[in-house]
Image: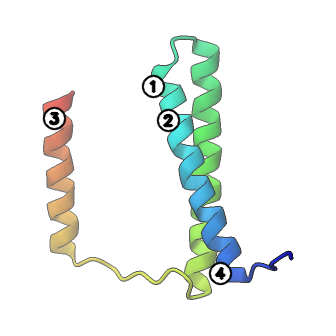
């Protein structure tokens, strides 16, 4: 018997699929030594990221993915953390 998915199930599945695709494209990008392949993976990654964000925004508007704004202090703390991490890795 075929199950008909509701709006929430479709959106969650689409978002999860985009996240998985982005991981695959990222792996392909960092593992490839061919410039043409790297360019393709980069383009696919960027397109998928755009589509993923559109799905996220749709879910947020429908109340399917509630979020709340972080206080400025938490944003600053996260920026400092990742700037420090970036500096130690690069």
The nearer-to-camera label among 2 and 3 is 2
Q: Secondary structure at mark 4?
A: helix
16 sits left or right of 69 in the view: right
Q: Earlier in the sequence, mark 2 or mark 3?
A: 2
Where is residue 65 drawn, in percent x and y? 51, 80
* Residue occupying image coordinates x 47% and y 21%: 31
Q: In the current view of this chain or complex, which residue is farthest to the right?
A: 1
Mark 4 in CB contact with mark 1 (< 8 angstroms): no
* Residue occupying image coordinates x 41% and y 81%: 67
Residue 3, by quadrant, is: bottom right
Mark 2 in CB contact with mark 1 (< 8 angstroms): yes
Residue indicated by mark 4: 8
Could you give the CA–CA distance between mark 2 and mark 4, rounded to whole angstroms? 27 Å
Could you give the CA–CA distance between mark 2 and mark 1, rounded to whole angstroms? 6 Å
Residue indicated by mark 3: 87
The nearer-to-camera label among 3 and 1 is 1
Could you give the CA–CA distance between mark 3 and mark 1, rounded to whole angstroms? 19 Å
Q: Secondary structure at mark 1?
A: helix
Residue indicated by mark 1: 30
Residue 8, by quadrant, is: bottom right
Q: Nearer the viewer, residue 89 or 76?
A: 89
């Amino acid at each position: 018997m075929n199950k008909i998915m509701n709006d929430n199930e479709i959106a969650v599945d689409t978002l999860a699929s985009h996240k998985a695709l982005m991981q695959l494209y990222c792996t392909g990008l960092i593992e490839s030594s061919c410039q043409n392949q790297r360019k393709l993976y980069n383009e696919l990654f960027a397109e998928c990221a755009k589509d993923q964000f559109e799905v996220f925004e749709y879910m947020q508007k429908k109340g399917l993915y509630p979020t709340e704004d972080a206080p400025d202090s938490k944003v600053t703390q996260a920026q400092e953390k990742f700037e420090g991490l970036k500096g130690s890795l690069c």
